[in-house]
Structures are given as structure tokens and as C-alpha cells.
Amino acid sequence: MKVVIVGGVAGGATAAARLRRLDEKAEIIVLERSGFVSYANCGLPYYIGDVITDKRELTLQTPKSFKRRFNIDVRTSNEVLSIDRADKKVVVKDLTSGDVYEESYDKLVLSPGARAMWVDIEGLDSSKTFTLRTVEDTFAIKAFVDRKKPKTAVIIGGGFIGLEMAENLKEIGVDVSVLIRGNQVMRPFDHDMAVIIHAYMRGKGIDLRLHQSPDDYAKATASADLVIMATGVAPESKLAEEAGLELGPKKSIVTDKHMRTSDSDIYAAGDAVLTEHYVSGEKVLIPLAGPANKQGRIIADNLCGIPSTYRGSQGSSILKLFELTAAATGLNETTAKKLGMDYGKVVLNSQSHASYYPGAEPMFTKVIFENKTGKILGAQIIGSSGVDKRIDVFATAIHGKMTADDLKDLELAYAPPFSSAKDPVNMAGYVIENVLSGRVKQFFPEDVEALIDRDDVCLLDTRTDEEFAEGHLPGVIHIPVDRLRERLNELPKDKKLYINCYSGLRSYIACKILAGEGYDCYNLSGGYGFYEYLISERAYDSSLRYPCGVKK
């Protein structure tokens, strides 16, 4: 069997290595357009920021190491120009020599990845403008930074690459502006979570500008020393299109669950492939390294007679931004609402580990669940330490189709430096269970404005005097939770009580006290600390508060 693989990064390199492990006799040729193979896309921004200082660390394998270990013929700087499906061959150009040649195949694997998108900006100086997708892109940006010593940089786009570049340029002393067309960075997150990232970025001195127009782009880039175009990626599917393979949205390559295209002798993997969302069943594009690697392995299995299937992507992703960590998995609320799903949500304002152990940090967790069953549909977490392990638990729970009841019963590792006896994951299960059972009713920051002027509503703040003095909801009655029982006469029984504290814990206790006295109560999900981010431009608050609300 002769297998030709187009593209030698995540999906292609994995398919090649797995295929060799399964079949020692197969002839395997990898054709890679760039000068590098099996490189670490996700590590590229960190070379520019001098976090990774040895350029050799960016490449996991080389053509020589592939040949030595796997007996695979890897040809870098070789671009596939066309596919002849009838004669089962590809036309290839050696970009170093200029020679054009043909290569036959029994099976063809397409792993072309995605191309960086470009925004046309009037007057843009191309000599100072870069995209970041390949190792060559990285070296070009690094050389420009080392040579020109830019003092200012404009980044167009607020996704993973945009924010990682903002961090790394800021760390080497460049003043950074991030411009985006919409109202938030990081689309895997809902707006109410993204505003926490906004606050953190501004607190770190990054000039974040939302709702930017083409004229805004032009003005900002004209005066910048360096411009990074980070507006997303699009499937690199020209070869597939010209070969007449079936394409989906954005010209993505359509495959079946075995990663076969509409041609039974051609498979495809990676960023150019249309896949199924594991939770919703939607056809989606999820350009992440994890899915690409899994798909490459599945292709190799099927080529060797092992009937492997791809079960879909749930978009598990994580971002480091200075000391902040932001992670998401599954569906966010925006998507659940768009799909018309019957969902619920909870927001937890907790800490990374036991608050009495030094170094605990705040953590916001938003969980989306199915109202009928309590099944977990998605999660988003923003904090510092401990975010990664919690999002992985949620990702596992989603993959296992677990419910809130399952979350609360999980026995997770606990010691004060690492967690709390009731881990935030367990707490999410408890809170969702309370909501589904009707033991607590919620309201959310986006509801507050409409509640303020309603005649049938009374707003109640149960925080301390010190906290209340720092800021509070308009028209709210203030009664600290520990004085609530003695001041019940101040609360009207003919109105619904909408109650808040800093995190949602004391207001929940207040709800239980007042419900026992016959009041109709609602608890502010995420608390006033979460609400504040949504309605203000304040910097991120990395300080921790005791359960009473006082800062540590």
C-alpha cells in the first residue's frame, strides 16, 4: 500500500506515524508545503516572547528523524498543485528546485490545515504586517521585532493567537492595542464571561478596543510600529475543491465518521475538515490540535483495516494570558440559545483551593445544563491556578454524558493546597441540583436593569457594611445576612425579593431563611462580584475574599 499524505503538521504527522506502527511494509510519503514538519503551532507566540528561546524546540520531528525512526519519506518545501483522482496521482512542485513531478498513490490523506484570514485595511503597510500560522511566520515576526525594536503594536483580532501575541509582545516591552469588530474577545466564551478577560487585559495595560470599524483599523495601524493580523482561519481546501470533493460551509472538506471524503480513496483530517459537534450534533469547524491528532490516528486505523470512527469535537480549549487562565468545553449559552435548546445555567464565584491555605485565587465558573435531565452541556472557567484540571473534569463529564447529580457525587482529590473539600466541580453539581429541584430560584446580572423599576420587586443586599459602601445595586435595601432574622419587618411580604451578596453564598443562605418565613426569593447567580464585571470597566480583581466578603 502506498499512502501519500498532504500536510505534515498535526493530523498528517500523526497519521503517518500511526500508519507506520500498524504497517511496517506500507510506503508512506508526506508532502509539506512549508519548510518544517510536525511543528508546534500552539507554541509559536512564545518564541516571539522569548519564553521559548531555542527555535529547535518548535519542531517535534524533522524529515531526517521521520526517516530514521519511522522510515517515512517526508518532503518539506513540496507543494501539491493538483489531485488527479482518476489516475490516483498528485502533481507536486519542489519549491526549492522549482521542479514539478507526479506522485502516484493507493490512498491519499489530506491534512492541509487552515490559512490565516486577512482584513483589507486602507493604507496598510505590508512590510510591518504579519500573520502567525507557520514556523516561517514566527521567524519573520521575531526577526522584525529583534531588528526594528517596535515600541507599539496593533493586533487585529481577539482569539487565541491575538491574545497570546498580545501577552508575549507586552512581556518584551511593546505597548499593545487589541482591536476587534465585535463586543468581546474569545468566542468560545459567553459575553458575561469574556468581560472578565476584558477587565484583566486592561488591568495589564493592554489597550482593548471593541466595536471597531474599518476606519478605526486604518487609523490604528497607520501609527503602529507592528501589526499582527489575527482575525481567524479558514479551511485550506483549494486542492479538495479543484478535485471535486464534497465541501461544506466555508468550503470545509466533508468526511464520514471514518474520515473518508466523498472519494473512498481519499481521507482528510484537521482544521480543513467539517466535523460534528459532540454535544449538539451540529456540523461545525473546530480548528484545534487535539481533534486533528485524533482524526489522523483514526485515518491510519482505517487504512489498516481497523474500523475506527470519530465521535465528534466538543471544542475543549484553554488560554494562558499572563497569570490568568481561561478555559471552555462543550456548548456555551450563546450557542445553546441559538439552537433553541431547553437549557439552564449557573455561575459560581469560588476559589482555586481552600481559602485558608495561602495562595488561593478567585475562580469564576459558568455551567450550561439541560433542564429536563440535568445533563452537562458546557462549561467555562476563568481564574488562575486550578482552572485546567476543573475544565478537564467538565470535559470528561460532557463526554460521558454525565448529569449534575453525577458531578456532586464525584470523588475528586483534595488537600488544602489543591482544592476544597467541596471542589468547584462538586459545587456546580450541588447548585444545579438545587435549581432543578426548585430549592433555589435564580436571577442573573443581565436581569438587574429590568428589575430596578418594577413595583412587585424588592432588591436586597446581604453583604457587610464595608462591602456595601464600596458599591451596590440602585434602590437596594441593605441588611447583612447575620442580622436578617431580627430585621424581617423591613422587608415587604407582598413583593418578590431579589437578593445578592458578593459570591452568591450568603444570598443563598438569606434565600433559605426568607423562604422559611414565606417570602418569594431569587438569588443573584455569581453574586455582585460577577455582576460588577458586566456593568463596569474596572480592572480584574485578583484578591480573594473570605466568606464574609472581606478581602484577605
Image (cartoon, rainbow, N blue to C red):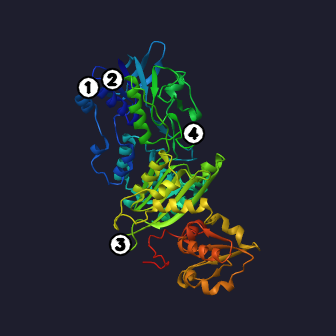
Q: Earlier in the sequence, mark 4 or mark 2?
A: 2
Q: Position of residue 270 (x, y in %)?
A: 45, 35
The correct choice, above or below, for 141 with respect to 357 in the image is: above
**Residue identified by numbered label 3:** 357
Decide which of 515, 233 is in the foreground and name it. 515
**Residue identified by numbered label 1:** 71
- Left-right relation of 524 to 197: right
Q: Disc 4 versus disc 1: distance between alpha carbons?
A: 39 Å
- What SS does tag 1 mark? loop
For the residues bearing labels 2 and 1, Cβ distance under 8 angstroms: yes
**Residue identified by numbered label 2:** 28
Q: Disc 4 versus disc 3: distance between alpha carbons?
A: 43 Å
Q: Earlier in the sequence, mark 3 or mark 1?
A: 1
Q: Nearer the viewer, mark 4 or mark 2?
A: 4
Q: In the rendered structure, which amino acid carries the disc numbered 4?
A: Gly
**Residue identified by numbered label 4:** 281
For the residues bearing labels 3 and 1, Cβ distance under 8 angstroms: no
At label 3, counting other C-alpha atoms closer than 10 Å, the crowd grade (few under 14, some 14-19, many 20 or more) is few
